[in-house]
Amino acid sequence: MISRSIEIILLAVLLRLLIMPFYFHPDIKTYHFQASFFRQGVFNIYSYLDEHKQELPFKEEFVYFPLTYFFLGGYQFVALPFLGNDFDSWLQSGGIGSAEQIGTFRYLFILKLPYLILDIIIAFLLASFFKEEKEKQRALLLWLFNPFSISLIYIFSNVDILAITFVVLSVLLTQRKKMILAALCLGIGAGFKAYPLIFLPILLLYAHGIRQKSLVLLTTLGTLVLIIAPFIGSIPFRQSTMVSGLTTRMLIPIINLGFDETLFIAILPFSFICFYIWIKGKTEIDNLARYFLAILLLLYSFIHYHIQWLLWAIPLAVIVIVKKESLKWVLVSIGVLACLIPLLYSDKSMSVDLLKPISLWYDLVPIPFSIVSNYYSPVILQSILHSVLAGASFAVAWFLITSQDK
Amino acid sequence: MKLIKFNVLFVLLLLLIIPFLLSFKLHTLPDRLQPGLKGTERIYKDHILSQGFLSNSDNLSGVGLSIKNPNFSNKNELVYLIKDSDGNTVRIGSINGRNIPDGDFIVLKFEPVTNSKNRQFYFELSSPTSPENESFEVYFSEEDNFAEQKLKTDGRPTNLNLAYVIYYTQNSQVLVFLNVAELFVSRFFRDTTFFVFYTLLIASTIILLIKQPGRKSS
């Protein structure tokens, strides 16, 4: 069985190595450009980018929490001898320079290597959830051989894998009843990106007694506070990280109650799930992944999400499918639907531009948005698909929180 | 086993089939690579840029430029005119700032000009509705490409050339695909160290995989 596992992992690694140099999403260059200032001794990247906005070639804010900056910047220190002397000029180049320079294939390969390592680590973590050898193998296969994670990590250069690794570790530790360590992992994960915090209420429900609940809460939030403490006083930090991305998109869909009061639709199902689990009383360890997955499915339903965010759900879906094979095709269908929606955005970097390392000329190929426009409104089509996704997610989320495995 | 087979096919799709199919959607090709970028010239209100060039082929159908538009702040129209040597406008088009990411290479497309070979043209860029503090900025080149055909700003000649690329519509899709493949291979080989390392890495992984004891289907 060990030999079989090694064979699976080797083949999975081979498939990933084949893709790594050839697909390019501009995010990888953006956040590595920002992280490159760590090599120059910049500690507070948020203030630095704000103060030097005029002279920098790129004006984007660094939207992740500090651990992402330190991790990527630290990795660049290690990788620099292999990246070569032209790496910094590649980072600073715009337009054609990004995908055309000689070193592009090398840079993409090397910059994605940490994702490969974390990808394999997650595979082992997922296998660790299960006692039976057959289930361990199944978990390995489902994670390592699904087109969703391969695409989201290596085509869309998904740096969220850093936070995801800690979320998976947190779920595993909760399963083993090591609640404080689970809380610590959630806090560390949040130190890369904020999304793990949405699982904190569920984790609290799994803690026993006021003392343990308090410790879990303090550990998660305390860890995060320690990580962001040096930056809390920085206005650019607060603007970049706390008022962007997930946090703001959750607050966009609303129901107007009148008298200046609104309901935030994205928060409604989240609150519902937490209180339902609380009332239900039984927080079986094996259900934790189900609850987390239910929350994410409903979150995607009510926000305009980035395709990269879909990766958050995949390790949880793997755990659920291993225990409940009948959900496989339902979740795959939801995954396909969820991926189709961003592909219809009016954004070249979601489709043809991904292949620029192979040929810059692909920039001339019409994107799905343009092609669909010839026949129907792509925006309406997106909305229809998103509505179908929301309905499907409701059904699956309800099933996940009300039923039991086997 | 089905899952593994499916994913192997998926990766082959990503590496071979999609690029192949996309090549058949390429109907225009550039005449060369974009020259290196040096600085920018602004386009706003009455500030107009004009660049002359010689068309090398028939079916002239686009001009590629790198354009700055920080944070998509300028959502006005960038208007482009193609004029012949007599100053007659032969083609006109526009692109909205919403579709111009900061620093991106943008191709300004138009209907092919069929008898364009060896003819002198100018492209003129303007954005009458853009305020000065939210101008588009177009990169000029660090190279001195055409000694006689310099960039003009508001009709006045400068010593600069915009960093442009000219596009022509192609008649043969097979030729396009072969061009794509040839350029890809030559670019991949140019980083020799990485090419050798990468090839050895892939080969080693395949050998390790083949040598795994007790390989069976599941």
Image: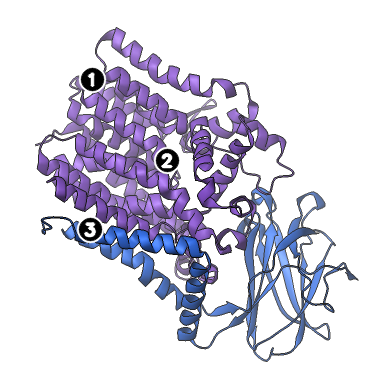
Chain colours: A purple, B blue
Residue A79 position (above or below residue B107): above
Question: Which subunit holds the residue at mark 3?
Answer: B
Q: Which residue occupies the extreme bottom position in the image?
A: B115
- Judged from the image, the secondary structure of the residue bearing numbered disc 3 is helix
Please, what secondary structure does the residue beneath circle 1 have? helix
Is disc 1 in contact with disc 3, using a CB cutoff of under 8 Å? no
Q: Nearer the viewer, residue A87 or B81?
A: A87
Q: Give neighbour class at mark 3: few <14, some 14-19, many 20+ (Cα, 10 Å).
A: some
Disc 2 to disc 1, how far (Cα)? 32 Å
Q: Secondary structure at mark 2?
A: loop
Q: Which residue is disc 2 drawn over? A: A160
Q: Amino acid at mark 3?
A: Leu
- Place of residue A172 in the rendered image (x, y in percent of width and height, measured from the top left): 25, 29
Which amino acid lies under the numbered mark 1 shown in the image of this protein?
Ile
Which residue occupies the foreground of this view, A396 or B123? B123
Identify residue for label 3.
Answer: B209
Can residue A395 be seen here?
Answer: no
Q: As displayed, is residue A237 above or below residue A81?
A: above
Q: Is residue B100 left or right of residue A228?
A: right
Chain containing the residue with disc 1: A
Callout 2: 10 Å neighbours few (<14), some, many (20+)? many
Q: Quadrant of residue A203?
A: top left
Q: Label 1: few (<14), some or many (≥20) within 10 Å?
A: few
Q: Are marks 2 and 1 on the same chain?
A: yes
Upstream in sequence: badge 2 or badge 1? 2
The residue lying at 27 percent from left, 39 percent from top is: A316
Q: Chain of mark 2?
A: A
Q: Residue at x 66, y 31 (%)?
A: A47
Q: Position of residue B50 (x, y in %)?
A: 81, 71
Would you place residue A250 above or below residue A386 in this image? above
Q: Position of residue A220 (x, y in %)?
A: 39, 20
